[in-house]
Image (cartoon, rainbow, N blue to C red):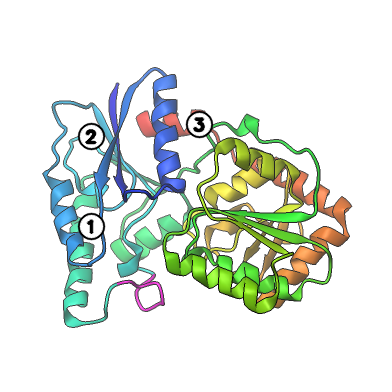
């Protein structure tokens, strides 16, 4: 089957959605299909550009080239095709559940409200064209039903090469790999290190989305005297580096604000048999992070996060047990590429 996987793309930004798109194409081809990835440039700043990119996506017409089109994100699912099967990773959340929060991103003006209503109206029109709608998490499915009225089925994203992740030791540092931005809350992780009572350290790795994000973290480290406790690798790290850090870390920290899914970070941690600390408002991470079983789910407060970090360090035997339980848990959920390819193409 000739398949187009369609994803929106912001230049120089590479995160979980981009990683998933690349891996989906590889796995479809490995299973005998002829799949390609099509990237649609997307810009939301200034907000007026969003409408132009919606129109551009709609003008794409792949009917004569592909038997199946699999869009992943807004506005990629606006494209026209008679066999459109959606694996929804992201809508434009700024006009949905993030509206009225600090992460809204669109001004609450009459113009901003018109833009919001325009996006929702066209989402409702073009989502209706999909033959099937899968999502990456219960949270994404619930939001789609609540705001747009569409039913969907959860299809959990697997790792590309899960077998590469392994455990060498339970060291003295917690690992937080992710794009660096306000929604991922690396600044909260750094502030938590003020309250650490053990000798545990924190390693943050990721590409900052803005100079402001990096300056803010550096200012925190300087202000609180944490240069010996917190290390930041402010760039995209290779897969080999990431596997190595996971293999040697004590555990993982992943504390985003209202994440759609469990995130690749949690999968990578558990395939490395490392437990995870997340927050009660981190969204889909609770699919994998079970409090006091596969890690800790704590309030988004520095003292609570610090206490969980100390528990990992003080009782390493229990930390190891939680990491192994995490691996058992993801296996029980049938998170596999065989399942993904079958469901998207059947």
Image spot of residue 150 (x, y percent): 31, 55
The residue carrying mark 3 is 337
Magenta stretch prevailing secondary structure: loop
Toward the viewer: 103 or 66?
103
Report x, y in % for residue 19: 45, 41
Seen from the viewer's position, the closer of residues 119 and 255 is: 255
- The residue nearer to you, when weighing 131 against 28, is 28
Q: Position of residue 57 (x, y in %)?
A: 18, 47
Identify the mark at residue 343; answer none if there is no mark. none
Task: Determine the secondary structure under disc 2.
Answer: loop
Callout 2: few (<14), some (14-19), or many (20+) C-alpha neighbours within 10 Å? some
Q: Residue at x 44, y 40 (%)?
A: 20
- State whether residue 210 is above or below residue 219: above
The quadrant in which residue 111 appears is: bottom left
Label 3 SS? helix
Q: Residues within 10 Å of mark 3 (few under 14, many from 20)?
A: some
Q: Nearer the viewer, residue 6 or 235?
A: 235
Q: Quadrant of the C terminus?
A: top left
Image quarter where the N terminus lies is: top left
Instruction: Tell me the magenta residue range.
Output: 98-105
Q: Do residues under tags 2 and 1 come within 8 Å of each other at their CB atoms?
A: no
Q: Residue furthest top?
A: 32
Which residue is tagged 1? Answer: 123
Which is nearer the N-term, disc 1 or disc 3?
1
Give the residue at x 41% y 77%.
102
Circle 2 residue: 83
Direction bottom: furthest residue: 109
Residue 65 position in % (x across, y down): 17, 26
Q: Nearer the viewer, mark 2 or mark 3?
A: 3
Q: Secondary structure at mark 1?
A: helix
Distance between the alpha carbons at the discs numbered 1 and 3: 28 Å
* Distance of label 2 from label 3 (alpha carbons): 21 Å
């Amino acid at each position: 089957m000739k398949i187009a996987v369609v994803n929106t793309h912001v230049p120089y930004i590479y995160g979980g959605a981009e990683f998933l798109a690349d891996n989906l194409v590889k796995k479809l081809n490995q299973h005998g299909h002829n799949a390609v990835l099509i990237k649609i440039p997307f810009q939301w700043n200034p907000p007026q550009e969003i409408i132009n990119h919606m129109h551009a996506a709609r003008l794409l017409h792949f009917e004569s080239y592909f038997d199946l089109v699999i869009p992943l994100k807004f506005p990629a699912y606006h494209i026209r095709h008679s066999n459109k099967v959606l694996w929804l990773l992201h809508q434009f959340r700024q006009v949905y559940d993030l509206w009225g929060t600090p992460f809204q991103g669109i001004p609450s003006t009459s113009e901003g409200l018109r833009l919001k209503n325009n996006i929702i109206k066209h989402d409702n029109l073009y989502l209706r064209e999909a033959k099937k709608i899968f999502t990456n998490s219960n949270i994404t499915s619930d939001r789609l039903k609540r705001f747009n009225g569409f039913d969907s089925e959860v299809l959990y994203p697997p790792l590309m090469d899960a077998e590469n992740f392994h455990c060498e030791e339970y060291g003295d540092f917690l690992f937080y790999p992710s794009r660096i931005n306000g929604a991922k809350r690396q600044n909260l992780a750094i502030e938590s290190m003020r309250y650490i009572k053990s000798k545990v350290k924190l390693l943050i790795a990721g590409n900052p989305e803005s100079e402001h994000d990096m300056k803010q973290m550096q200012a925190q480290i300087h202000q609180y005297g944490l240069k010996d406790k917190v290390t930041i690798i402010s760039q995209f790290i290779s897969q080999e580096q990431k596997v190595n850090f996971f293999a040697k870390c004590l555990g993982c920290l992943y504390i985003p604000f209202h994440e759609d899914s469990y995130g690749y970070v949690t999968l990578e941690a558990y395939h490395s048999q490392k437990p995870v600390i997340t927050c009660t408002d981190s969204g889909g991470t609770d699919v994998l992070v079970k409090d006091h079983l596969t890690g800790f789910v704590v309030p988004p407060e520095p003292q609570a996060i610090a206490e969980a970090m100390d528990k990992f360090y003080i009782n390493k035997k229990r930390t190891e047990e939680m990491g192994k339980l995490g691996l058992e848990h993801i296996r029980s959920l049938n998170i596999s590429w065989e399942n993904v390819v079958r469901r998207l193409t059947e």
